Image (cartoon, rainbow, N blue to C red):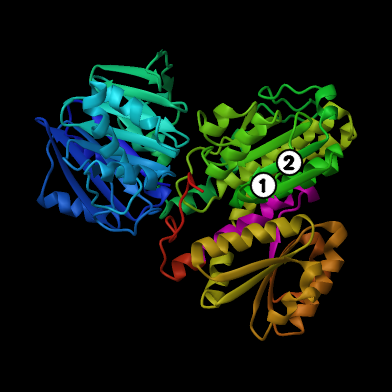
Amino acid sequence: MCGIVGYLGQQQAETILLEGLSKLEYRGYDSAGICIQKNGELSMSKAKGRLKNLAQELEHHHLEGHAGIGHTRWATHGAPSDINSHPHASMSGNIAVVHNGIIENHNELRSKLQAEGIEFRSATDTEVIPNLIEFYLSKEGGLLKAVARTVKELKGSYALGILSKGEPGQLIAVRKDSPLIVGVGDKERFIASDVPAILKYTKQVVYLDNQEIAVLNADAMNFYDYDLNPLAKDIHEITWTAELAEKGGYDHFTLKEIHEQPKALRDTMTGRIQPGNPIRLDELELTEEQLKAYRRIYIVACGTAYHAGLAGKKAIENLARIPVEVDVASEFRYRNPIVDQATLVIVISQSGETADTLAVLRDAKAKGARVIAVTNVVGSSIARDADDVIYTWAGPEIGVASTKAYLTQLVAMYTLAMKFAEILNISQGSDLDELKSALLNLPEKVEEALAMNEKVRAYAETMFRVHDVYFLGRGLDNVTATEGSLKLKELTYIHSESYPGGELKHGPIALIEDGTVVISPVTQSDLVEKMVSNLHEVKTRGSRNLILTMEKHLDIVRDAADEVFILPDTHDLITPVLAIIPLQLLAYHVSLLKGFDVDKPRNLAKSVTVE
């Protein structure tokens, strides 16, 4: 969740750190701070709240220097406050650290250091790190050795940026389970939690792997494992531009990314799907014998990615006739699941750094399972640790509420399901060709759905003051209803729940009263009449029904609806891609009408890198 930026070079570090932190605001934070190294001294400025608070403070008290570290904090230990903000310094002020992650044994380490006479200022877990480094500095004979000794004692997840008064012109970075990259410029070096933070300054990056240390100087960089054995690391070229991470003329990143969905779908399908030809997934080497040998398949993810997994389950079971379980990663980890060499695990994560999903991946591999990852971020932890990776080419997604990443996850799961069917020779070729053609037509149909924007905005004006909204759906429509409900919660803070249509009579119908808004996608041809029956049940109890359907179903649903959004027609299996579009737009417009920050909804973070 937190964001880290570091700089070392010839430019003023303060400007670069603030610029970089602004590009990481999407990760979610409650405070920010920077530390600048100059002439053997370390100077800090920290502020609770938005980054603008820190920027205003620095307008009056500039920190000059050519090396520094910066941080946006999401509170885990210690309430949001100036004193709990990062960077944190050792008691003497000789060592400064920024940290993303959680130190699980911080109480034990704090007690050890307090017994040595070290005093703590904050309530954070992070403060043990600079104090532990300083504790070992004299014992180990140098900063690098002290850092290596320290990180061997830390339990948990962390990405670290470290400065020392005694090592001017040097920046040390460490990674374990939290993302961190090194940027390479002309006589300057950068560190960051994510590429957008440094893309304005360099496209050359080195991805740190788990338990690796980087020692950076303006004109040199060296990499080590925790035993200080030297490592050879490759420099990667970032192929997307800084402009892609900007708003591109839209009022908000969220709206921009909703409208980027046709391109994201085209990019994700390019080279993979062609009518009359087998699905091409060069990333996946899976034989018929191997696929038949798996006794169970799990799809594991969190949040919106979990909803993509629900659609993926239906696609795999329908096309490849393989039973699939879908689980929330944070639950799957702790229910002692049956995982072994006969298990195939599919994990889905937009960022590739989702902590619970990453832990499932590693646990599954340790038990002998094969893991396929669906992710949007090349070089992410999940991408590197999985056996096979299917990338969703959504491009950078800055808005906290996922939109285009979700659609590309859906298409990636449909592609994988068709690949499984082809490997097993289960589905008829003509059926798959029909589905492939429907998928390839989706970008144009998404553009048609986006053309409903003004109608959706007008509807938003009729309901943005409500306190409760209920979503109903059957089959794949229930997947869309669940994701639509989540979007409304995330962006508008309206209480929203989603139920399968058939569950109404088992309790939820008691919540319906005059004026209750009920939203229902009705796209599944074999379930239309049953769903309409459910909608009549709530309508007779006073609900205001919004129905999303196709023209071909209009005559059946009309009497149950107070408002209808007509979707472009497509194959029943892939309707979730189209049906979610107006629900994304609805959440966006309601959020604006309520005066909220649509790109950065409260209490949420883009990349959940802690449990």
Between 333 and 322, the residue placed more toward the observer is 333
Residue drawn at x 42%, y 43% is: 105
Position above or below: 282 against 250: above
Q: Residues within 10 Å of mark 2 (few under 14, many from 20)?
A: many
Main secondary-structure element of the magenta-colored stretch: helix
Q: Residues within 10 Å of mark 1 (few under 14, many from 20)?
A: some
**Highlighted range, magenta:** 565-589
Residue drawn at x 50%, y 66% is: 492
Could you tell me the amino acid type at mark 1? Phe
Residue drawn at x 38%, y 44% is: 108
Between 9 and 110, the residue placed more toward the observer is 110
Position above or below: 569 against 225: below
Which residue in the structure is indicated by mark 2? Answer: 298
Position above or below: 603 against 42: below
Q: Is residue 484 visible in this depiction of the protein?
A: yes
> Which labelled disc corresponds to residue 332?
1
